[in-house]
Amino acid sequence: MIGTGYRKLAEELSLSIKNNVAYGIIQDYMTTLSEGIGYKDIYISACIYDETKDIIEKSLSETETKKKYRITEYQITDKSVYIKFFDNPGTMKCIKEFVEWFYPFLKQAGALGKSYCTECKQTLNKSVCKFINNKAVLLHEYCAEKIAEGIKEQIKNNNEKSNLLKGFLGSLLGGVIGAIPWAIVYSFGWFVGWLGLLIGFLAQKGYYLFGGKSKKATIAILSAAIIIAVIFAQILGDCVTLGRYIINGEITEFAIKDIPYIIYSLFISDKSYVADFIQNVLYGLVFAALGAYQILKKVSKRVTEENPNIKDEPQDI
Ligand SMILES: [Zn+2]
């Protein structure tokens, strides 16, 4: 989506508007302008060596710079500078001032522009314009092919089924570890539902540690692992509680080894026990869902990050 502000700027700077972005050369650098709810951004494709990176980093990290141009976020890699602006009335003026200041600054700092391939850092005699994740870049034809191959490989790896199984085991392990504090806190008779947050958090950590990839199935896998872990946490909590009673001598007719039997008996014969059990599990799931909401956001972000794409420059029809 490109609004009137960016449309006007694109016209002033002779940029093209296609695929919901404005792109073209601004002062020697291939640039892509795009916007979303509450922000506008600038993606500058350039070859950036470490020294140059330090200079840019130093300048962009200054509070005064951020405030002056309404910069909320920025990212510098060896291939690009990405700047995100907070969007409200007056932001276009800030962006114009930013462009006037930043591009000559970039040049001075030693960033290499349109005559260089961002992939291999060599000079470009004949370049192709490609859209990588909808950002315009100039490359050698063969470098573009190499990137396309790499992306294909990455997507293939992301789709491997074994990753999902490993991810499930990882999230289950994380959830089970998260169940331990739950069980201990519960055995003291305290409210434990909020520890569902920890279970949710550790389950997603485990998922990624075991090589689980971000994809749509992640949500289902994490949900299953979290539900199992919360139920496990509650059962473990009852085990620990009963264990304490037996050790303290408050229950004398049973021994530690009888705990599974006691819990089984409670399940089939004590309705109030089952009601409490379900209530605790539900509270836990509500909190785990709260934790998982953050995870969900992260997953959807990671899905876009981890499923890159490279396309030809859009053509006029
Ligand atoms: Zn190249």
Image (tube, grey):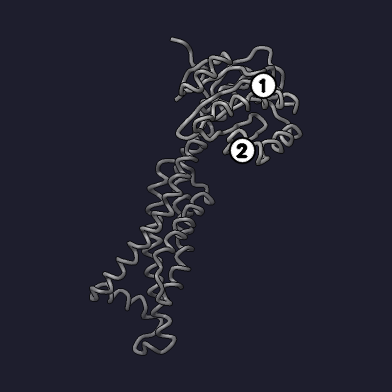
Asked if the beta carbon under badge 1 is closer than 8 A to the nearest atom of ligand 1, the reply is yes
Picture quarter with ligand 1:
top right
- Residue 117 is marked as 1
- Residue 144 is marked as none
| Side (left or right) of 114 relative to 221 | right
Rendered view: 16 above or below 132: above
Residue at the spot 32% in from the left edge and 75% down from the top edge: 263
Identify residue for label 2: 67
Rendered view: 3 above or below 69: above
**Residue 162, percent from left and from top:** 46, 45
Question: Please, which residue is most extreme toward the front here?
Answer: 90
Rendered view: 170 above or below 236: above
**Residue 252, percent from left and from top:** 36, 90
Front one among 207 and 162: 207
| Residue 71 visible in the displayed image | yes
| Side (left or right) of 166 relative to 101 | left
Residue at the spot 41% in from the left edge and 68% down from the top edge: 192
